[in-house]
Amino acid sequence: MKPDLSPTARALLALELLQASPGITADRLADKLGVSERAARRYVGILREAGIPIESVRGPYGGYSVGRALRLPPLMFGATEALGLVMAVLDGHHDGNDPSGLVGSALSKIMRALPEPVAAQAEAVRRSTAPAPDRAAARPDPRTTTTLVHACSDHRRVRLDYRTEAGSEWLVEVDPWAVVVRHGRWYLLCHSHTSDARRAYRVDRVRGVEVLEASFSPPVDLNPVAMLEEHLAVGWEYDVEVVIDAPVESVAPSLPRALGRIEPLDAERTRLIGSTSNPTWYAAQLAMIPVPYRIMGCPELQEAARVIGARLLAGGGSPPP
């Protein structure tokens, strides 16, 4: 017996066990509850009296299970399970067929709660789906992400054990402002006390997090998505300046923030200032601007634009210049 549990608490525990282990036998249920088999059957009776559809099957392979009701019973997710499910939705990661994973575990709970006809169809999709996850996506550790999200919410400084893409490892103290998802990658937007500057760190490269006692106040006008896009557009190998023959308000909707910052050059023209380590990609993005523009300097970008322009002309049936 477990004398520290009240009858109500023990009945709720019995319900959780029935949900987690469909087909559980009376003696197994009794063992889990720490009561006699007779008492276990009594708790099943209490649940039935409360309107919970508990089904039983007699025989050597029989046992108890919770019937499929039209109303969803409460789902009890752990913090990492819940975040794992949210992360799967946000970054398109597909691991729902693995019951040992966080997402698979959470989905299993949802499946058990669905009405049987709906669950049968959903389970068929789950079994037959051939996932095609984004190979460029980088899934961070949910526990690390949970810690960083809480630190952002609580405005607590953290110390990161970080490993760069080149393999360098170092410790840095930062004020975590926000966790942002962009194209399948998770970033921590923050203020670095080591460099006294705004930084964006890949969460999947964080090897450890220590929450410190110091607190902070985030910027009043913080727009995490816009700030991250602007940050990722600067500091690359090739500096870019482009003059666009249209006013800012008409150009802004067709320019991704990742290209850089735009500003009015005069009433009829706009200046784009940014940087890139991939001139070909940058030139392809510029090619989608629906108005004339000129690349000022940056021979690498100018050459990439000429190559793409010649390719487009050839595709349209015109001889290259």
Image (cartoon, rainbow, N blue to C red):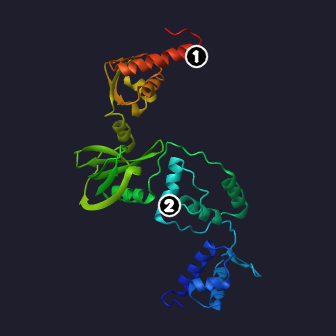
Where is 24 relative to 153, above or below?
below
Residue 184 coordinates in the image, percent (x, y): 48, 44
- Indicate the amino acid at tag 2: Ala
| Quarter of the rendering containing residue 275 | top left
Tell me whether circle 2 and circle 1 mark residues in contact (CB < 8 Å). no
| Quarter of the rendering containing residue 73 | bottom right
Residue 216, label in figure: none
- State the separation of the CA atoms marked 2 and 1: 49 Å
Mark in the foreground, 2 or 1: 1
- Indicate the amino acid at tag 1: Gly
Residue 82, label in figure: 2
Q: Residue furthest front?
A: 167
Tell me the residue at 41%/51% (across/down): 204
Looking at the rendered structure, the secondary structure element under dot 1 is helix
Residue 315, label in figure: 1
4 and 53: which is toward the camera = 4
Residue 219 coordinates in the image, percent (x, y): 28, 47
Where is 259 relative to 318, above or below?
below
Residue 311 coordinates in the image, percent (x, y): 52, 17
Q: Is residue 1 left or right of residue 294?
A: right
| Precedes in sequence: disc 2 or disc 1 | 2
Q: In this view of the protein, can residue 13 be seen by the observer? A: yes
57 and 238: which is toward the camera = 238
Q: In this view of the protein, can residue 261 be seen by the observer? A: no
Within-10-Å neighbours for mark 2: few <14, some 14–19, many 20+: some
**Quarter occupied by the N terminus:** bottom right
227 and 284: which is toward the camera = 284
127 and 48: which is toward the camera = 127
Looking at the rendered structure, the secondary structure element under dot 2 is helix
Within-10-Å neighbours for mark 1: few <14, some 14–19, many 20+: few
Tell me the residue at 44%/56% (across/down): 141
Q: Is residue 214 left or right of residue 123?
A: left
